[in-house]
Amino acid sequence: MTDEGLDVAVEDKPLPRFVGSDAPVLMLVDDDAPLRRSLQRAMERRGFQVYAGESLKEGLNIAHSVKPAYAVIDLRLEDGSGIDLVARIRELHPAIRIVVLTGYGNIATAVAAIKAGAVDYLAKPADADDVIAALLATGSGLPPPPANPMSADRVRWEHIQRVFEQCNRNVSETAAAAQHASPHAAAHPQQAGTQGIRDHARIPVACQKRRAGLREGARTWPVKCSTKGHRMIAGADSKSAAPAEPTAKKLLLVDDNAPLRRNLVRSLERFGFVVATAASVREAYEVASEFLPELAVVDLNLEDGHGMELVESLQELRPGLRVVVMTGYDSIASSIVATKAGAVGYLAKPVKPEELVAVLDGSAEPAVDDSPMSADRVRWEHIQRVFEQCNRNVSETARRLNMHRRTLQRILSKRAPRP
């Protein structure tokens, strides 16, 4: 027969069933045979009935033949995308809990997977306990942190070894695939230092003075609003503001970086938006209650709080509000939390205006990267996930990762390494 959702031929033959067992049914679809077999054995030891396949076609066959309560799906399959399989399985079994597992992760596909119906998105290597915690987690956030998570250096080492085996133990090919600086790093991963991560550009003195003024209570959004269709801009005089289109959508921009905020306002105006701005969480609440935006762009790290607080709060204030999160500290873990909180998009700085507009209007497509994440990016993602699981508590995260607190603070203060 043919699956109507994905137009893929499905074998019409029954699968072996576990007679007389009340164990939960889990379907596992991954084209990495060693990992699939290892994870299948581990999940069976933990009490699951596991039906395993290696392709989109076999995954659909399992979904049509049994009624799984859980699923673990690889992102990249030989005959299709794991995200398409997630969406189709969700249609067949609305109550199923799905975790996407991949070694080729990026933020765009993580957001797409959550929107398609997955409850979590894990970067390989991930052990069975991490997978079970993600499958059984309740609420809209991430599962609780594991009692003894792998250290960040161990995760990095495991990733290098996995790519090394996939490249048939070819050091040069592994170095290219894992994006190392030299073959020596792949041959001796324990000696390879953490790749340099770009620091934030130093804030100019003038910008520091402006921020000091904001902290003292200066407002950047005009209290008096023109009723003649003028754009409302941070610090702008309504008399000199250019008139907006009558049908222009009202957008709230929340970012504590004043130069970036001004540049983005000018760019968004050219696309026809009416823009109001805020530089902090407190100010965002004040402006939103008066401005009543239809769209919002929120920075993740603000001076007086975390932008994630605004995502849900703004939607409660304005039901149907479309929120896009942007940050210079991008990670898969925070993109999952933001998407579950209701954000329609998650972008890493620097953000191109046309890219932001495409996400706001829903026309952006996720970019699929065919190369594995770099070892340093895998290490970074692991640290960020445990950090989010610990409710962004630095001391607790450092304790669980067996890392010095100051070391962790230095890592968290830097931008993400290249994917």
Image: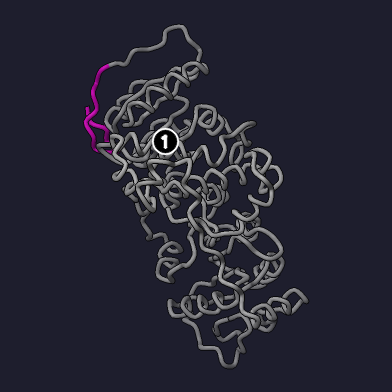
Any part of residue 323 in sight = no
Q: Is residue 294 above or below residue 120?
A: below
Q: Amino acid at mark 1?
A: Arg
Closest to the observer: 236 or 157? Answer: 157
Structure colour scheme: one colour
- What is the quadrant of residue 87 in the picture? top left
Closest to the observer: 21 or 368? Answer: 368
Closest to the observer: 61 or 198? Answer: 198
Q: Position of residue 223 (x, y in %)?
A: 70, 81
Q: Position of residue 189 (x, y in %)?
A: 44, 41
Does residue 344 show up magenta in the picture? no
Q: Position of residue 246 (x, y in %)?
A: 48, 80
Magenta stretch: give its range.
1-13
Badge 1: residue crowd in 10 Å (few <14, some 14–19, many ≥20): some
Q: Main secondary structure of the magenta part?
A: loop
Q: Is residue 134 above or below residue 236?
A: above
Which residue has dot 1 on it?
90
Q: What residue is shown at x 24% (from left), y 21% (from top)?
A: 12
Q: Is residue 188 above or below residue 295?
A: above
Q: What residue is shown at x 71% (from left), y 46% (from top)?
A: 395
Q: What residue is shown at x 67% (from left), y 68% (from top)?
A: 280
- What is the quadrant of residue 315 in the picture? bottom right
Query: Looking at the image, which residue sits at the far bottom?
Result: 239
Does residue 11 show up magenta in the picture? yes
Q: Secondary structure at mark 1?
A: helix
Any part of residue 299 in sight = yes
Taking the image as shown, residue 102 lies to the left or right of residue 12, namely: right
- What is the quadrant of residue 227 in the picture? bottom right
